[in-house]
Amino acid sequence: MILVEEALRLILEKIPRLGTERLPILQARGRVLAEDILCSRNIPPWDNSAMDGYAVRWEDIRGACREKPAVLRVLADLPAGQVFKGRVGPGEAVRIMTGAPLPAGFDTVVQVEDTEKDGDRVMILVAPEKGKNIRFSGEDVKAGEKIMGEGDLLRPAHLGMLASLQRCTVSVYQCPRVAILSTGDELLEIDDPWEDGKIVNSNSYSLASLVSECGGVPLQLGIARDRREDLAAKIQQGLAADLLVTSGGVSVGDYDLVKNMLDELGRMNFWKVAMRPGQPLAFGMLSGKPLFGLPGNPVSSMVSFEQFVRPSILKMSGHKNLFRPALQAILREDIPKKAGLVHFIRCRLICERGKVYATTTGEQGSGILSSMVKAQGLVVLPREQTLARAGEEVSVINRRGRGARGVLKKGPLPSIPGRPQGKKGSISLEGFLFFVCTKKRLGDFCVLCG
Ligand code: AMP
Ligand code: MG
């Protein structure tokens, strides 16, 4: 028996990070940056107006008010995208649009609402503070500043920033191609005619989508039958990918050929991991490619994937943060367990009066795929624990988020304009934001964000 943490350590030690490639920025969303990005110039590059209004010299309008407006001569109309090259002197102003470069000699912009035009003159009715309504050169980023670094995940804002630096392409880590192979004579493909005694190959679909969810490219190799030649040929095919995941055939059984086959092909580890579900696990490097032999039961294969394959794919893709966010929740029911194995219990999360509660999704057998369908998270019960009691605080792996670690905060109920209101006490997980919608202000509530 090997501990979960020990298996994970041994696996991650062996997992290589992939090489890099250069991509047009739009194709790089969700990838991990493989270079530091230094700002080639100030952003914004010049002082510019934050408002439609009038560029003025502050000393000309000091103290102006409705009763005693300052009157200035308007030299020009300056739309965004144009530069005023004239000289400016006392008592002069330029009508300026949002984004237009501030002409040299001016130091303040008065918003149009605080002015009144009168022929080629303008009356300044309210005097703002000096420097008001100007976006200063470099206030966003300064030339030479490192705005993004190697290892950063590229999100939409990063791509906008790269575009504003006129970077058409960017160097990112390659994204792993992951071959998925189901094994077993009992399996039917999704579109095969129904046959008594057979089981539909669902693992290929859950595993392939787990791969895409964490940024890998799944390559479905279909089913290998419990015959040496078939298995050997499909495993060879799988080694063309960057990582190979098989399901089935790694436990002790008459037809568990996969285990023997892998053993012949290279140096594999066949572990009994101290966890439930997902005890049997094969891992090794074949021809330099990591190979995971996951158990065949649908829940076991998904939980083992979560625990071992997902962090490996993230590492290969250049990510620094390899784990899903965890949160604390209060158990709603007793969960009996024996000491010796870490249990991953499929759970729903419920928010009530500022507290997060976990309830199981019902029957927890490793073949009960509906328990995964219903689950928002996995309660992790430590190895040495026996009975977990209702009311106890437990750790939960949040399966609906990525890279974010949540903090439970007291505070007013977050309301997000334009989003439908949920039922009182319901909880939604949307990207990094974990929020509760209710018509009533609960007084203390929680937001979890990354
Ligand atoms: P095994 O690990 O090969 O002994 O399989 C354990 C159980 O998982 C058996 O009941 C299999 O029928 C089931 N199983 C194996 N592979 C798959 C698959 N690809 N899709 C769905 N169920 C599977
Ligand atoms: Mg089998």
Image (cartoon, rainbow, N blue to C red):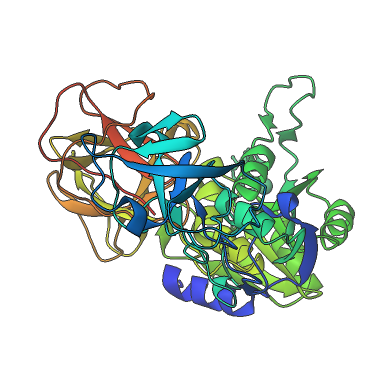
Position of residue 341 in the picture relative to residue 388 (left or right): right
Position of residue 61 in the picture relative to residue 149 (left or right): left
Query: What is the number of callouts on the image?
Result: 0
In the depicted structure, whether residue 41 falls above or below residue 82:
below
Front residue of this view, candidates 374 and 448: 448
Front residue of this view, candidates 265 and 138: 138
- Which of the 4 image quarters holds residue 288? bottom right
Point out residue 221 in the picture as x, y percentages from the top left corner: 81, 46
Front residue of this view, candidates 136 and 89: 89
- Which of the 4 image quarters holds residue 259? bottom right
Q: Quadrant of the N terminus?
A: bottom left
Q: Residue at x 67, y 62 (%)?
A: 165
Position of residue 243 in the picture relative to residue 359 (left or right): right
Front residue of this view, candidates 90 and 341: 90
Is there any visible trace of residue 278 in the rendered image?
yes
Point out residue 144 in the picture as x, y percentages from the top left corner: 59, 78
Q: Quadrant of the C terminus?
A: bottom left
Point out residue 183 in the picture as x, y percentages from the top left corner: 73, 47
Is there any visible trace of residue 405 in the rendered image?
no
In the depicted structure, whether residue 296 falls above or below residue 35:
above
Q: Residue at x 80, y 24 (%)?
A: 192
Q: Residue at x 67, y 27 (%)?
A: 197
Position of residue 356 in the picture relative to residue 80 (left or right): left
In the depicted structure, whether residue 355 falls above or below residue 286:
above
Question: Splitting the image into four quadrants, where does ligand 1 fall?
Answer: top right
Point out residue 251 in the picture as x, y percentages from the top left corner: 59, 57
